[in-house]
Image (cartoon, rainbow, N blue to C red):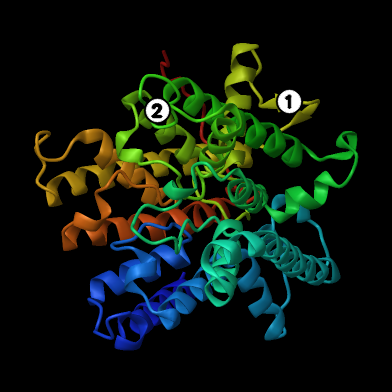
Amino acid sequence: MAAFVVVIGLGGLLLSLPVASESREWTSGVDALFTSTSAVSVTGLVRFDSAEHWSGFGETVIATLIQVGGLGVTLYAGMLVLLVGGRFGLRGREFFGFELMGANERDVRRLLTRIVVFMVVVEAVTFVLLLPWFIEQDGGGTGLWRALFHAVSAFNNAGFDLMGGGTGFQGQVSSPYPLAVMGVAAFLGSLSFLTVFQMRRRPRLWNLDTRLVVIGMFGLLGAGMLVFLVGEVQGGRMLDGLDVGDTLANSFFLSVNRTTGMATVELAQAQDSTTTALLVLMFIGGASTSTAGGIKIGAFMVSLVVVGSALRGRHRAEVFGREIPASIVIRAVAVTMLALVALALGIWILALTEGGSAGEVPFLPLAFEAMSALANVGWSQGLTAGLTTGGAVVLMVLMFTGRLGTLMIALSISERPLERYRYPESAVRIG
């Protein structure tokens, strides 16, 4: 956490310098710190259009912050430990995913190398695929830089864009090629490197974590596409008027971006039904140790397993012939409940800082803004730019909490019980 605070502070300092802005004027400290927090937490919420406000230096700083924050403390903390000659104990190995429990030092070193290779390969392939399209749109130099920037932003689920005009990718609503390329890169980033490595094996050899992640992520991808297809295609809605191919491409891109924050439509015009569904999809997020935020798909799937087991009369969480340890169940409940508390507090404080009355600030856009920050998504329904200083600070706290909170909560609960005694049982009424 201290390392991330230092990186955010340094990024805010660099972005406040005159050389970082197109106008060569100082950027407000709050706005610079907000942008730095958004980049390091790979959220993508912005106070102004990135292409119009930031210079080439400022855009480079943002891309660097995205890259540093993308794989989170998992990779960088591990590299730091190895560089200073440290060793990984049980808790250290938990940092790299529960599949690595019992891995030795050599395994962890090899994993770190594979993570870096995975990141470089996906970003490089995304860059190469985007390059011809961006060169055709923007010319040689500008196209080269924008292809690189968006490859980094997409894979790291950051949501920053350099398309200009403050409209994101709305101008590319009928350009399925870049949407498909960036969508696939973002989805790979949200799956996590551990899941991708496991998926190279035959499905019957996948461990339980990979099975739950794959089922959950592809299930939510389909659910997100369905939300947009049902709610935003006909009757003058956001995706109305597109042909079948463009409709499917946009639905896929928008569904993937529930963890990334890029958009081809004006989300402020979304139906209330769509906005409500997106709140849930953003809250769940991506896989653990991925570049995505949210409570993580693992916590969501474990919760579903608990519900399913309860309905079948089981007192233990069981699925696919395996029993999920009680410590994992407790982690899932703790992460979910504390995230709900943080969200409720964020919405309440935002309502106070932004005027409060329903007539001035509609509840759904306010909740959407808070959820986007906490889940590190970056979608907005038009409130970010006009927030007061207090509101901007609230979103910064939510972004930071969303990026590190779930990991710190998960690691605070030991795999093995620490108590040396137990109290007598006593029933509590439920239902």
Q: Amino acid at mark 2?
A: Thr
Crowding at label 2, few (<14), some or many (≥20) Cα neighbours within 10 Å? some
Viewer-side residue, 230 vs 332: 230
Q: In the image, is 177 to the left or to the right of 390?
A: right
Q: Residue at x 35, y 77 (%)?
A: 12
Crowding at label 1, few (<14), some or many (≥20) Cα neighbours within 10 Å? some
**Sequence-wise first label, 2 or 1:** 2
The quadrant in which residue 219 appears is top right
Dividing the image into 4 quarters, which one contains the C terminus?
top left
Establish if 86 lies above or below 287.
Answer: below
Q: Amino acid at mark 1?
A: Val
Whole-percent x and y of residue 408? 51, 57
Is disc 2 placed on a helix, strand or loop? helix
Q: CA distance from mark 2 to mark 1?
A: 31 Å
The quadrant in which residue 52 appears is bottom left
Q: Residue at x 83, y 40 (%)?
A: 206
Q: In the image, is 285 to the left or to the right of 76?
A: left
Query: Residue 274's mark?
Result: 2
Query: Residue 380's mark?
Result: none
Q: Residue at x 41, y 79 (%)?
A: 58
**Residue under pointer 1:** 319
Viewer-side residue, 269 vs 418: 269
Is disc 1 placed on a helix, strand or loop? strand
Whole-percent x and y of residue 376? 44, 52
Q: Residue at x 25, y 78 (%)?
A: 27
Whole-percent x and y of residue 115? 74, 65
